[in-house]
Amino acid sequence: MLFSPEGSRHRGPHCRRNHPGLITLPPTPGSPPASATPAASGVVTGRAAPWLRHAAGGQQRIEAHLSGFQFAPHRHDTYAVALTLEGVQCFDYRGTARHSLPGGVVVIHPDERHDGRPGTSDGFRYRSIHIEPARIQRMLGGSGLPFIAGGTSTDPRLIGPVRALLADYRRPLDELELDDALYDLSTSLDALSMPRRRTRPIDHCAAERARGYMLEHWSSDVSLACLERASGRDRWKLSRDFRALFGTSPYRYLLMRRLERARDMLADGHGPAEVAAACCFADQSHLTRHFRNAFGVTPGKWARPA
């Protein structure tokens, strides 16, 4: 539902650029046609084809308009935080249909399955940022990851920090400015979060060593025994620490890195069967199943020319 900036940076050839910084997304089959593009001001006027634009500075901020396009159920391994600007933003989350109106905030917790679609025929426009859960947890002093019930909020305590991150969209944020805004967002999420159990002490260094090992050996067979040796931490304590710090399991983290590599290869024109073999998937159907679960589209749709 919240198009991942990592996912769109390496776009497939089916994603068209109408002008610098703008990516036009493929319509969902069976949807009515749309033809407009965003005005120079960035404000959509009239019916618009789905498009996506990256903010300057490579800080994982995007602006997008979705019309005649919807995402299949999928999961991110980051927090996805969005501000709805126009229209009705709809998605299914934790077994319930949710919606966000202009001015509302959407918060998708890491590893939570969701989809995404416009609530009206005019589509919706939003800005979003993806944030590694480890960054939020460090800002909160190692406490449990905050969780926003329902995935939406109109609380001013949350809207303020989100606007600070996303309002001045065309200007890169200074590093200190970004850290301050993320800290305000983290503390607001913490204040509004559902009650959660106090977490045990986390061995951050061991979890980081395990992550580093997986990044280095993403194309090899990796087991908890391997991670135990690499991190110097008991495998079950490490598994618990990793989930608390990164918001997902070691297996899921490694799988997402392989899928990111697969997405890059597809964008470079490699075929799905070749990509599956190169990225540690048993076959093309294995890749397709996981790719759709992660990104909401199939490898073929990602790579298909417009």
Image (spheres, grey):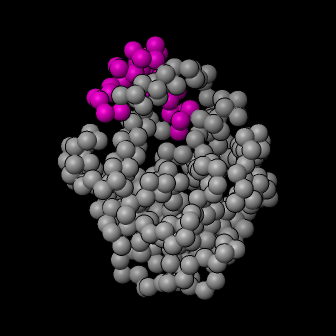
Q: How many marks?
A: 0
Q: Nearer the viewer, residue 116 or 220?
A: 220
Give the residue drawn at x 54%, y 45%. Answer: 78
Judge whether 229 appears above or below 19 on screen: above
Q: Quadrant of the C terminus?
A: bottom left
Pinpoint residue 28: horizontal percent, then vertical percent. Answer: 39, 74
Say whether residue 90 is visible. Answer: no
Give the residue drawn at x 59%, y 40%. Answer: 133
In the image, taking residue 154 as reference, residue 273 lies left or right, namely: left
Pinpoint residue 240: horizontal percent, then vertical percent. Answer: 49, 28
In the image, taking residue 18 as reference, residue 235 lies left or right, namely: left
Give the residue drawn at x 55%, y 70%. Answer: 19
Judge whether 234 appears above or below 101 on screen: above
Residue closest to the far front: 20
Judge whether 219 appears above or below 190 on screen: above
Give the residue drawn at x 76%, y 39%. Answer: 176
Q: Nearer the viewer, residue 123 or 190?
A: 123
Q: Which residues are magenta?
A: 218-247
- Check if residue 230 falls in the magenta segment: yes
Say whether residue 186 is visible. Answer: yes
In the image, taking residue 284 as reference, residue 115 lies left or right, namely: right
Name the quadrant containing residue 82: bottom right
Pinpoint residue 221: horizontal percent, then vertical percent. Answer: 28, 29
Pinpoint residue 13: horizontal percent, then vertical percent. Answer: 37, 63
- Check if residue 98 falls in the magenta segment: no
What type of secondary structure mainly makes up the magenta span?
helix
